[in-house]
Amino acid sequence: MPDRIIRVQYYALLREQAGRSDETLTTSARDARELYMELSQRYAFTLPAEMLRVAINAEFGEWSQPLEAGDAVVFIPPVAGG
Amino acid sequence: MNAFRFSTAPLDTASLQREMRDVTCGGFAAFEGWVRNHNEGLAVTRLEYEAFAELAEKEGARIVQEAIARFGVTRAGCVHRIGSLALGEVAVWVGVSAAHRDEAFRACRYIIDEVKHRVPIWKKEHYENGDSGWVNCERCAAPAAHHEEYAAPAAHERDYAAPVNYLHEHAHAHDHDHDHDHEIPSVAAPDYSRQIALREVGPEGQARLRAASVLVVGAGGLGVPVLQYLAGAGVGRIGIVDADRLEPSNLHRQTWYALADCGLEKSTLAAERVRALNPEVRVEPHALHLDANNADRLAAGHDLILDCSDNFATKFLLNDLALRTRKPVLFASVYQYEGQLQVVRGDEATACLRCVWPEATRDGLVGNCAEAGVLGPVPGVFGSLQALEALKLLLGLPGLEPGEMLIFDLVSLNTQRLRARRTPDCDAHRRAGQSAATLSPLELEVQFGSLAEAQAAGFTFVDVRDSRERADDPLPSLALCLPMSKLLTDAAMLDTGGRYLLICATGKRSAAAADLLRSQGFRECRSLRGGIKGLKASA
C-alpha cells in the first residue's frame, strides 16, 4: 500500500496521550483501524478502538473504512463530564 | 390603587381615574368594557361574572406589572366586576397613566387583551327568552401571541375598535389627590423585550417559551448556565434533577452558587436562584438521582430534556427515554478543555447516543471532572451552547441536526460538526420499538392536582363535554370547547403542534379524543387523567 498523507485530530484522553490535538502524517495504513493501531504504538494509547469512534471527513465512519489521500480522520473518545 | 382587583359594586370610573393622576404624567388612557344587550343573535337581559379569585387576582396583578415593565408607564390598574350586572354597566375598567400618550395607549391595550385572555373569569348570560348559559369558555385561552383568535368580539363588551379613551396632555402641575393607595410593588417584572425584538422570536416565540417545559438533569457545571439562560428567557416550567450537595471544589465552574451554600442540595439552591432570577418560571427541584424507576415520572409533562449530567449511566438512561417517549434530549459533556454536544430526537430514523457510542461505553473509562480536571469556563461554554440549542429548538430555529455531534476544542478553538447515521442494529432503537406500543397510552394521559398546575405547565385546555354539561359544571378556567360530536369537524381550530390538555367529566372521553386527535397529527394532545371528577377528588 503506498504511503498517503492523512490529517488526524485527537480529542480528550487521546489528545493528552498524543500530546497534541492534530497532526498531518504519512501512513501506509489501509483503513482507520490500521491507522489507529499504528498511532497506538507510537503514543501508547490506552483506549482500545472498540471504545472510540472514528470520523472520516466529518462523518462518523467504520473502522474498516479504507483511507484515501487527504482524508481528515478524527478519533473521538466518549466523554461524560458535566 | 391595587394593580388588579375585583369589585362586587358598580365601578366609579371618575374615582378610578383620579387614582391614576400623577404630576409626572402627561397622558392617561382608559378602556371600559360594557354589558351589551345581545350576543350571537340572542337578546341578553343581564349577566353574571364569576372568577377563580385566587388565581385570577395573581394573574391580573402579573399582567399589570408586565405592562408597567414593558411599556414604562407610571401607573396602571384594572378593576373587573363580579356578580350580577345590568345592561350598560361597566364590566371592566383599565386605566394607565404615563409620561407620554403612546405608551399609555399601548399599555392599556395590552392589559385588556391579556386580562381577557389569561385571567380565569367566566360569565353567565341571561337571555330575554328566560334561558341562560355560561359563555366564556367559547373564548380561546391560547397564548398572548394569537390575538386575532380572540379579538373577535364574541361576548358582551363593545368592540375594541371603539374604546373609551381619555387623554389629558397636561405637563403642568395642578391639583392632585395623593390620598390613593398606590400599591404597585417596587420589584421589577421580567422583561423579555430584548429577545422579543428579534424577528425570529417576537411575541409568538415568547409565548412558545412561556408554554414550554424543560427538564434539566444535573445542576452543576453545565446545568448552571443552562438554568440561568432558560430561566432568563422565560421558559414556563423547569424541572431540576440533582441529588448532589454543593462542594467547595464545584465553585470554580458553578459560579452561580456561594461558598456559604456548600453542603446544601444543588437542586434546592438552583431552584432558589431560578426563582430569584425570574419568578414567572415554575420551577420544580428534585433531589434525586435519575434512574430507570423514576426517569419516566420525572420526564412526564416536559417537552424537552437537557442532559447536564456527568456520567454515562444517566446519559444512556436519557437516551432510552428519548427513544421511548420521542421527547428530544440535548446532551452535553465536557472533558478538560473540550466537549461534545448532541441532540437525540428519539425517532426511528435518526441516530441516538447508542448509534454513536458502543455498548461497552461506561463510566470510569475516561475521566470525569474530578479525575481529569476541567477549566471553569469549559462547562460554562458548553452549558451556554446547550441553552442556546434548547431555545432554538423550542423556537423552531435551525440548529444541530438530530444525531449530529458538535465537538469544540477550547484550546485550539477548533470546532467539528460530525454527522452520525442511525445504526441498523442499534439495541436502544430495537428495545424502544418493542416497548413503544405499551408505553404510548401512558403518554396520552397526564395527571394534575389542579387546573392551575396544568396551566403553569403550558397547556391550553380543551373541554370535550357537551354544552349542557359545560353549563351545569363550568370549568373554572378558560378553555376551548370542542365537544366530542364536533371533534373531527372542528379540529381545524387547533394547531397541530399545540400543547392541548383535553378535559371531560371523568377522563374517559378525553382520552379517546386525544387518541383520535393524535392519529390526525395533533401530536401534543394529552388527556387529563380522571377528568374534572379527579380534580375535585384531589382538591
Image (spheres, rainbow, N blue to C red):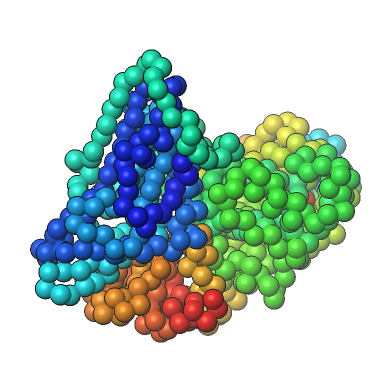
Find residue A71 and report its image quarter.
top right
| Residue at the image position 27 percent from the left and 44 percent from the top | B32
Q: Residue at x 34, y 30 (%)?
A: B28
Is B438 placed above or below B107 here? Answer: below
On screen, residue B97 above or below A57: above
User: Which residue is farthest top?
Assistant: B172
Q: Position of residue B133 (x, y in %)?
A: 24, 72
Q: Residue A50: in sight, yes or no?
A: no
Decide if residue A48 is on the left or right side of residue B354. right
| B208 on left or right of B358 | left
Marker count (numbered): 0
- Closer to the camera in the image, B464 or B100: B100
Q: In the rendering, at what x and y percent does residue B244 appear? A: 81, 58
Q: Nearer the viewer, residue B500 or B400?
A: B500
Q: Is residue B119 visible?
A: yes
Q: Position of residue B191 (x, y in %)?
A: 51, 37
**B409 in relation to B146, above or below:** above
| Residue beneath the point at 36% across and 68% down | B462
Image quadrant of residue B300? Answer: bottom right
Q: Where is residue B464? Give x, y as percent.
A: 32, 75
Residue occupying the point 19% across, 47% down: B159
Query: On the rendered structure, is B375 left or right of B26?
Result: right
What quarter of the picture does the C terminus of chain B occupy? bottom right
- Answer with the quarter of the image where residue B282 lies: bottom right
Which sits in the foreground, B22 or A76? Answer: B22
